[in-house]
Amino acid sequence: MHHLLVTLGSHGDVHPFVGLGMRLRQRGHRVTLAANRVFQPVVEKAGLEFAELGTEDDFHAALHHPDLWHPRKGFRAVFEFSVQPMMRPAFELIQRFAAEGDLVVTAHAIAFGARIAQEKLGVPLASVHLAPCVMRGAYCPPKLTPSNFMNYLPAWMNRCLFRIVDGLVIDPLLAKPINVFRAELGLPPVKRIIDEWWMSPQRVIGLFPDWFAPPQVDWPPQLRLTGFPLFDERTHHELATELKDFLAVGPPPVVFTFGSAMTQAADQFAASIAACQQSGRRGLLLARHSDQLPSSLPPGILHVPYAPFSELLPHCAVLVHHGGIGTTAQALAAGVPQLVVPFAHDQFDNAERVKRLGCGIELSQSKYQPRLIAKTLEQLIGDPAISSQCQTIAQRMRQDDPVDTACDWIERLDNSRNFIATASSDG
């Protein structure tokens, strides 16, 4: 089979698909990964064919959007600058490959062009969710804002709130451009995009484990959970010599990162440096965009643009991060305590789940101040219960092979055209 993997977003959105693609290729399939041109080197180093969805200019324009990390406005920014512009190109790419013969598509759920192609062209599709916050469980709802008030409401009220949000916020933003494109293709209009339409009726794959997000009775029946895929370029990106030397000459440092796509964390990095100075801890700053950092760093503080977490984190004391699902998963796999400072998107929900597991502490942005950071770091490092739980979770993750499990479910799609029958008969 020819497997086409389609993803949008930053490194955290692309890395899981690279891991899936490598395994599918090992199983004997032809694999093409469609992503922004920025990721072409990563994809081709992994031995996969690359198809472009967006230019480097598109990617950097989205990264520098002022609302990208706003807790309320971030959703609109992602849709208008990343999701909507790639809807037609994704559809046309799938259409071209489908004309060549047997094709199975595995796509990030926000790649709406893939969902439209499934309906128009009859191409088998597995929708992929990287984080559990998109699963609308009325009995145990995700934490989508700094407040967690929905957890205290009855299920019927949460369902009403979902409908209100769809009617007032989600559909007014998403439905019009989607339905304009659908009309061009002769497809009927859709509504309740996030609640009812965007997930493939054939297969939905959650790339997270059930112990991180226990399945709910009102989750889609075609959903299968696999676990965290954990691909991080370890196979073709070694730790820099300067970083190896830094790790070797002192106690384990505290690692600070606010995401590979982050361009707006200057205040957070400044507070992180000050906290290290107050606590006497060594600090490692991971930031691809160095203009967020001071021109010179004090002794005991090192900056590197990138390091594979699977190589780095076993040598570190604490990981301080934004709550991205890929970063969260790598910290859990390494058994490292976490201090999570969520900004937007899925990060509030991921932070809440880290707390529930007993593997870390959450600080809001307003509380991310040097004195409290230093105090929280000492709490994380000195708490034997947190350390023990982190090691328990890390051991549990070593027993799983989530990539193989995900590939099993993808392969079951074969070239079936009967979406509903496949969803109900194989699982």
Image: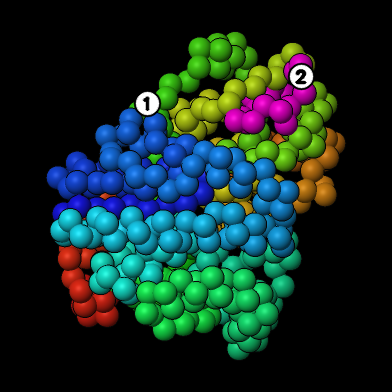
Start-end of magenta stretch: 280-297
- Identify whether 387 is placed above or below 94: above
The location of residue 212, given as percent across then percent down, is 49, 58
Q: How many marks?
A: 2
Helix, strand or loop status at disc 2: loop
Q: State whether the magenta stretch is mostly helix, strand or loop.
A: loop
Q: Residue at x 54, y 54 (%)?
A: 82
Q: Which mark is residue 236?
A: 1
Counting from the top left corner in percent of width and height, residue 116 is at 38, 70
- Callout 1 amino acid: His
Question: In the image, residue 22 lies at what x, y percent?
Answer: 28, 41
Instruction: Check disc 1: other Cα within 10 Å, few if <14, some if 14-19, many if 20+.
Output: few
Image: 227 above or below 234: below
Image quadrant of residue 425?
A: bottom left
Mark number for residue 96?
A: none
Q: Quadrant of residue 423?
A: bottom left
Amino acid found under the numbered disc labelled 2: Ser
Is-magenta flag for residue 289?
yes
Q: Residue at x 56, y 40 (%)?
A: 57
Disc 2 or 1, which lies upstream in sequence?
A: 1
Q: What residue appears at the point 68 percent right and 38 percent down from the top-left corner?
A: 263
Residue topped by disc 2? 295
The residue that appears at 22% across and 65% down in the rendered structure is: 413
